[in-house]
């Protein structure tokens, strides 16, 4: 069994070394379990500090492309087309995978290799690696995603490449391309497993992407959820409407 991790990279010199070291450890863990682990990095011509770290980990990285891209979604799409694993995911250059969570994913997939989509809980950490909260995983459904809570569990989601080949690439969104992708995936009725463990650590801090452009998140969630069938009566409609008003008045 082979796993592929796609790493979109741009000017994250503060944390990229931690992420690459984490992936090096995951590769060693996978190999000890008799599995292959492929790391593909797509860097959009980052600053010299990032390039220095990429050079330092060149023996760990299986494929490195340094070329200007159209944004995060575009870098990940390059990886989707290039990766060769049975299962794939992407990891941002400030997030981390959990050893124990990955071990559990391995154990599950060895016995259930027909699984199309597997994920688990996400632990939030700050800029100093201090955990703030854990979002426990639950079974996702398209109805919930577009009607009440647009929360997904990425990073830490693994997709079976044979299944996602028919799903296509990520759509051109600045923030919520992952939300749209999961909604699209769920329309195809995948075989899903939700593991009872922390599978990844998501770094949230004031100048992170998620922490700095929340208004854009809200606008894209509004558009995507409507595209997949959100109605006016859904609680998500009113929640997003209130957030849009809030950002209009106080931004």
Image (tube, rainbow, N blue to C red):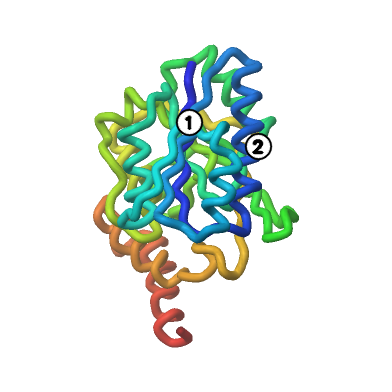
* Res. 147 in view: no
Q: Nearer the viewer, mark 1 or mark 2?
A: 1
Residue that numbered label 1 is attached to: 62
* Residue 215 in the image, given as x and y percentages of width and height: 42, 72
Q: Is residue 195 above or below residue 230?
A: above
Q: Which residue is mark 2?
A: 98
Where is residue 61 drawn, in percent x and y?
52, 34
- Distance from the alpha carbon under mark 1 to that under mark 2: 21 Å
Q: Is residue 75 left or right of residue 165?
A: right
Q: Quadrant of residue 81?
A: top left
Q: Locate residue 26: give its quadrant.
A: top right
**The quarter of the displayed image where residue 204 is located:** bottom right
Marker disc for residue 41: none
Q: Position of residue 132 (x, y in %)?
A: 71, 57
Label 1 close to label 2 by CB (< 8 Å)? no
Residue positioned 60% across, 18% down in the render:
31
Rendering coords of residue 109 (x, y %) = 52, 19
User: Measured along the vertical axis of the image, is residue 65 above or below residue 221?
Assistant: above
At a point 42% along the width and 17% down the height, the residue shown is 114
| Mark 2 crowdedness (10 Å alpha carbons): few <14, some 14-19, many ≥20 | some
The mark nearer the N terminus, 1 or 2, is: 1
Nearer to me, 243 or 167:
167
Say what secondary structure mark 2 lies in.
loop
Asked whether residue 246 is in view, the answer is yes
Residue occupying the point 66% across, 32% down: 25
- Quadrant where the C terminus sits is bottom left
Name the residue at 57% across, 57% down: 49
Residue 167, above or below 162: below
């Amino acid at each position: 069994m082979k796993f592929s991790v796609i790493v979109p990279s741009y000017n994250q010199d503060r944390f990229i070394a931690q992420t690459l070291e984490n992936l090096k450890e995951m590769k060693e863990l996978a190999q000890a379990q008799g599995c292959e682990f492929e790391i593909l990095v797509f860097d959009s011509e980052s600053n010299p500090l990032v390039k220095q770290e990429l050079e330092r980990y060149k023996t760990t990285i299986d494929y490195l492309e340094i070329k200007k891209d159209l944004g995060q979604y575009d870098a990940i799409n390059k990886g989707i087309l290039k990766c060769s694993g049975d299962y794939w995911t992407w990891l941002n250059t400030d997030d981390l995978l959990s050893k124990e969570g990955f071990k559990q994913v391995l154990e599950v997939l060895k016995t259930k290799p027909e699984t199309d989509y597997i994920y688990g809980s996400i632990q939030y950490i700050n800029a100093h690696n201090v955990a703030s909260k854990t979002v426990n995983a639950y079974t996702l459904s398209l109805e919930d995603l577009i009607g009440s809570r647009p929360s997904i569990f990425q990073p830490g989601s693994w997709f079976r490449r044979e299944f996602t080949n028919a799903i296509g690439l990520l759509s051109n969104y600045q923030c919520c391309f992952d939300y749209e992708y999961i909604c699209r995936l769920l329309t195809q009725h995948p075989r899903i497993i939700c593991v009872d463990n922390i599978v990844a650590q998501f770094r949230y801090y004031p100048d992170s992407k998620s922490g700095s452009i929340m208004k854009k998140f809200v606008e894209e969630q509004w558009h995507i959820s409507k595209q997949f069938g959100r109605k006016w009566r859904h609680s998500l409609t009113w929640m997003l409407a209130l957030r849009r008003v809030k950002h209009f008045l106080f931004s």
